[in-house]
Structures are given as C-alpha cells and as structure tokens.
Image (tube, rainbow, N blue to C red):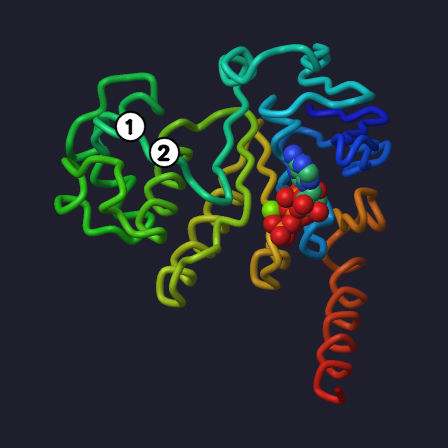
Amino acid sequence: MLELKNLSFSVEENGRQKPILRGLNLKIDNSRFVVITGPNGSGKSTLAKLIMGIEKPTEGQIFFDGEDITDLSVTERAKRGISFAFQQPVRFKGIRVHDLLRLASGKDISVAEACDYLSEVGLCARDYIQREINASLSGGELKRIEIATLLARQTKLSVFDEPEAGIDLWSFQKLIRIFENMRSQIKDSSIIIISHQERILRIADEIVLLTDGGIRKQGSADEILPALIGTAAAVDACERLK
Ligand SMILES: Nc1ncnc2c1ncn2[C@@H]1O[C@H](COP(=O)(O)OP(=O)(O)OP(=O)(O)O)[C@@H](O)[C@H]1O
Ligand SMILES: [Mg+2]
C-alpha cells in the first residue's frame, strides 16, 4: 500500500518559494488501478517524481507497505518494488533494447521473451531487439520500449506518466488493451497512471483529480467521469464561442 501524508513540494523562484504540491493526502491500496488526471501544470508529473524519489518533498511523508520511504533514494525504492515510466523517456547510450529488458526483469530473459514484451507494445520485435537506446529511436518507439520494460519488471507499484503521449492512434488501441490486461491480472500489485485520456480513465478503479497542486476530487470512474467530461465539454464550448 502507498500512503502520502500531508505531502508538499515547492521550488525557489526569484528568491521566493513557489508551491507546486500542497499538502496531499492519498492512500492507494494493493490491487488498485488508479488514474491521476488534471490540467497541464497541476503537479501530476511532480507527484510521480516524489513517489519514485526523483524529487524530495518539502514537507510530509511517503509510506510504502508501512515503511517510511520519504528519505530513500530512487534505487532503494526500486528495490522495494516501485517502478516508473517517464512522460519523456530517458535515452541510454550504449545499451541495447534486449539489455534494457534484461535489466528491467532482473533475469536473463531470452530473445523470444524479450520479443513478446515488445510485441505487446506493438513493436515488430526482431527489428528492435538489438537497437541501441539512443537518438535514432523515435519518441513513440522510445515510449513503447519504456512501457515494455515495466511489463518485464512486474513490480509491486508501477507508475506511468502519460503513457499515451506521442503514441499513434493504432498503437493507442493496443495500449488500452495492455492496460485492460494489467487491470484484469493485477493481483497484489497496484498501478498508477497519469493520463488525460478518457479511454484510460474508464479503466480506473479510482480517479484522482489534481488541480493547482491539490486533490480536488477522488472516487470511482462512475462518480468522477461525468463531471470531468462535463467540464471538458464546457471548456470546449467556451473555446468554440471565442
Ligand atoms: N523544478 C521546478 N522549478 C520550477 N517550476 C517547476 C519545477 N518543477 C515543476 N515546476 C512547475 O510546477 C508545475 C507542475 O508541473 P508538472 O510537470 O508536475 O505538471 P503536470 O501536471 O505533469 O503537467 P502536464 O499535464 O503538462 O504534464 C508547472 O507549473 C511546472 O512549471
Ligand atoms: Mg506531466
């Protein structure tokens, strides 16, 4: 179980503290598929980075399976079973796709197994397995390879930051199926997805709406989606009237 207690994060800007996250309290039980959504700049990626340990909170605590992990490094959190897929994936010069999948799974997976993970994310596996994770990969390819590494890792908590970003429509359908599968086979692990996509929001057991660094609403897809879609439709209508 993941628990955030009174979590705040601020940065210094022009000699002043600028609050990004303001006193968040959130509990995510095991076997939950949670989608965090909210406007651009509301603090979603920052929250993901705090959970992974890439940024440290200014105030508050993070507990994972009852242990206070607030001061643990990224590596220590990864060892405890937390994994993270970036909104903009990192490139690793000199490392090949097969090596990355092997590292992620923590065992010597065969070419066939690596191919299975890549096919799941819609990549024609044999073309990619020996490719280096460098600038020659397109943004969408890199994103899919990163999602494949999380599939290979099978950790207790997986955090995906906008997995749909930069992915074409055909692959998006496949991505939805991957997440539907993950949800149906969730067992004791939990999944947090940051997303703006209604199709992904619909799969959620729970939706958390973040606005201006705070939790505005939290509940099941049935409770939250109608209001969200209503708001989006209203914004759309205003845009059209401009
Ligand atoms: N290190 C930093 N220094 C200054 N401002 C920052 C820093 N990190 C985040 N911010 C600001 O905090 C706000 C939240 O950023 P964040 O990336 O968490 O938003 P987001 O909800 O993920 O947005 P998006 O939907 O566009 O991905 C933004 O206004 C961003 O500019
Ligand atoms: Mg973001």
Task: Give the quarter of the figure containing the N terminus.
Answer: top right
Q: From the viewer's perspective, is residue 216 above or below residue 235?
A: above
Q: Quadrant of residue 46?
A: top right
Circle 1: residue type: Leu
Question: What residue sits 68% from the left and 21% below the top?
Answer: 56
Residue identified by numbered label 1: 100
Q: Which mark is residue 144?
A: none
Residue identified by numbered label 2: 149
Q: Residues within 10 Å of mark 1 (few under 14, many from 20)?
A: many
Circle 2: residue type: Thr
Q: Residue furthest front?
A: 14
Q: How many marks?
A: 2
Question: What residue sits 13% from the left and 47% below the top?
Answer: 127
Residue 183 x %, y %: 54, 44
Secondary structure of residue under mark 1: helix
Image check: 1 left or right of 109? right
Q: Quadrant of residue 191?
A: top right
Secondary structure of residue under mark 2: helix
Q: In terms of depth relative to the viewer, which is nearer, 93 or 179?
A: 93
Residue 104 x %, y %: 35, 24
Residue 222 x %, y %: 75, 60
Q: In terms of depth relative to the viewer, which is nearer, 117 or 181?
A: 117
Image check: 54 left or right of 63? left
The response on whether ligand 2 sits within 8 Å of label 1 is no
CA gap, disc 1 and disc 2: 7 Å
Discs 1, 2 touching: Cβ within 8 Å: yes
Residue 156 x %, y %: 54, 24
Q: In terms of depth relative to the viewer, which is nearer, 132 or 184?
A: 132
Question: What residue sits 64% from the left and 25% below the top?
Answer: 55
Question: What residue sits 84% from the left and 50% below the top?
Answer: 217
